[in-house]
Amino acid sequence: MGRGTPVYPFTLLNERLQECVARKLREPTEIQRLAIPEILRGKNALLIAPTGSGKTEAALLPILDLIYRRCREADGVKLVYINPLKALTRDLRDRIEYYATSLGLKVRPLYGDVVKTYRKPTPDIVVITPESLEIVLDWSPKWWPHLRTVRWVIVDEVHELLMSKRGYQLLVLLERLKELARARLQRVGLSATVGDPSKVAELLGGSDGDVKVIEASERRRY
């Protein structure tokens, strides 16, 4: 299948996103075929697949579609993308922005001094480390009203975070974010390898319920 022709499950996405995807992705990978329909149904999910398998798009595309269909006009942050490495924050921002801008959605990385002060316009999506999120929730009250609209969370390298000393910190942060939003958060975790998927899924779900484990072994085909 060549570029330019949307194929399943990309055909489940809105037309703007389909056009954007068709310019970049040749065809869906295994993890994208398995995960996109489940996330569109509102399921919490743990995606386990090798590096280079398209996990980021498998999580991001359906959530962007849900934001666009349900609440794109609302002011406030809708998606918090948690990444353990500050060094990758800008790269992730650029990757997310490619798809988000096609829908008129704004993306902002939050780290350093940027975390401490709120400035307009409010982003629809923030990319942030657990440490920076803790600063926002502890010391940046001007951000709090803009986080009440959060409905989706993606946690990258979730196994590395949850199975380390940062794990308890992350679990507390997710519950605090949910308390601030006063709503269920749809949670999606990404990992290349997980020793105990059921345990990681249980931790990731927290008070937002069951997490569907979705595993794939296929890498992206170029």
Image (cartoon, grey):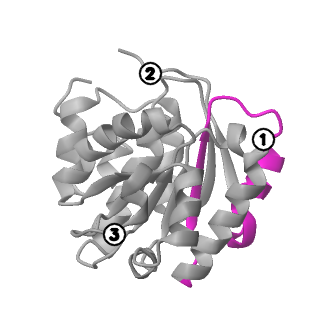
Quarter of the image holding residue 208? bottom right
Name the residue carrying label 3: 118
Quarter of the image holding residue 203? bottom right
- Considering only vertical position in the picture, is 88 above or below 47? above
User: Who's the residue at 31% across and 64% down the image?
Assistant: 124
Mark 3 or 1: in front is 3
Could you tell me the amino acid type at mark 3? Tyr
Where, quadrant-wise, is the N terminus in this rendering?
Answer: top left
Q: Residue furthest top?
A: 222
Q: Nearer the viewer, residue 185 or 170?
A: 170
Looking at the rendered structure, the secondary structure element under dot 2 is loop
Mark 3 or 2: in front is 3
Q: Is residue 108 left or right of residue 217?
A: left
User: Mark 1 vs mark 2: which is more N-terminal?
Assistant: 1
Could you tell me the amino acid type at mark 1? Ser
Looking at the rendered structure, the secondary structure element under dot 1 is loop
Could you tell me the amino acid type at mark 2? Arg
User: Mark 3 vs mark 2: which is more N-terminal?
Assistant: 3
Name the residue carrying label 2: 220
Residue 195, image x and y in percent? Answer: 81, 33
| Marks 1/2: CA–CA distance | 29 Å
| Picture disc at residue 164 | 1
User: Who's the residue at 41% across and 40% down the image?
Assistant: 89
